[in-house]
Image (spheres, grey):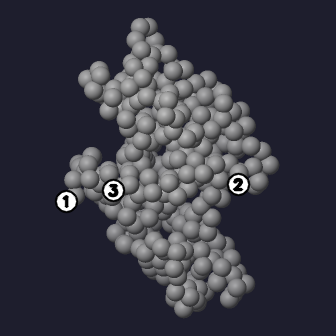
Amino acid sequence: MVEKHDCLLDHYSIFKRQALEKREMSTLPKPSMQTSSRDDAVQLNRAFKGLGCDTAVVVNVLGNRNASQRDSIQQEYETLFSDDLKKQLALELHGHLKKAVLLWMKSPVERDVTTLRQALTGPIIDIKTATEIICTRISSQIRQIKQVYTPTFGTLLEYDIGYHTSGDHRKFLLAYIDTTRYDGPEIERVLVEEDAIAISKIEVKKSGVDESTFIQIFTERSSAHLAALASAYHKMFRKELRKTIKRETSGNFKYALLTILEYAVDPTKHYATMLRKAMKGLGTDDSTLIRILATRAEIDLQKIKEDYLKRYKRPLVEVVHSDTSGYYRAFLLSLLGSEF
């Protein structure tokens, strides 16, 4: 088995490559040559001294540092003070701010495995969150998640999924995490049209819909293929693939298929829509809000902000500001690249 440390590095290298390719879409400021990881570590240690925590320092430092800088700060902190910075943060912070900062301090694969474990085995089982994470990760990321999940929690991801899901949804997720998909941009037009025809032939039987066609196509095809499939299906049959899925499937299985399709067609819209749902109406889905901002800030959050404004006619920064408060608000706004 690949060592956990190697898996973390592999996953992190994927993340760094994506971030480099889309660095103009990050909401974090560019690294400053004047910023010293050692100085940051000292500032944080001072913030923890005495009665209470100087939370403003924690927010100002960590909310404005990229992944490489946060890594260096953690190393400097351990070197200088023989202590684990994340453990100290867990002791000093509370509530939603604690959850946001601790998630931000993890590597991408650590965020995924931690959130998946919590969603599948926590006090409140959150199958939709687990499904959303799995269905928006490419094959290599899922492989690394599985490799880290087992040594971290002493069990297989497949076991936790199998125990807390059922029916076609379980069958689909287990097939999805066990299948290696091509992740590039090229597509085979003939295969796209064959898949469109296959879906059009799905018939409702007395015992229900035969889901095997959906499972095969959506677990084996790339995002580029599925985006092309949605377009081809509409051109060939004057129907929206999304509506066909909603009509022919149900429950968490339907949610999984729609998540994969929506992410394949337009990942920016997918996240903008999720943020809208998280903050629409009474109450805020803080877990979803934190997860999206922390995981997309160094990838494409700027683009998500632009899409949100265009789609909902209100700045995302303004909505987050009105739905949160205190240092928690300040930290999220820093991830959004806004002053607080």
- Residue 74 location in percent, x, y? 36, 32
Would residue 240 appear left or right of 249 to someone viewing this image? right
Image quadrant occupied by the N terminus? bottom left
Q: Earlier in the sequence, mark 2 or mark 1?
A: 1
Q: Which amino acid does label 2 sit on?
A: Asp
**Residue at the outermost front position:** 33
For marks 3 and 2, give the CA distance: 30 Å
Give the class, few, some or many, for how many residues have Cα within 10 Å of label 2's Cα (few <14, many ≥20): some
* Residue drawn at x 75%, y 55% as measured from the top left: 311
- Residue 56 location in percent, x, y? 54, 20
User: Which structural element holds mark 3?
Assistant: helix
Q: Which amino acid does label 3 sit on?
A: Asp
Q: Mark 3 against mark 2, which lies toward the viewer?
A: 3
| Residue contact between numbered discs 3 and 2, judged by CB atoms under 8 Å | no
**Residue at the outermost left position:** 1
Q: Mark 3 against mark 1, which lies toward the viewer?
A: 3
Residue 329 in view, yes or no: yes
Q: Name the residue under label 1.
A: 1
Q: Which mark is residue 10?
A: 3
Q: Name the residue under label 2.
A: 307
| Residue contact between numbered discs 2 and 1, judged by CB atoms under 8 Å | no
Would residue 29 appear left or right of 213 to someone viewing this image? right
* Residue drawn at x 62%, y 40% as measured from the top left: 336
Q: Is residue 261 above or below residue 55?
A: below
Q: Quadrant of residue 45?
A: top left
User: Which structural element holds mark 1?
Assistant: loop
- Residue 220 location in percent, x, y? 43, 77
Q: In which quarter of the image is residue 147?
A: bottom left
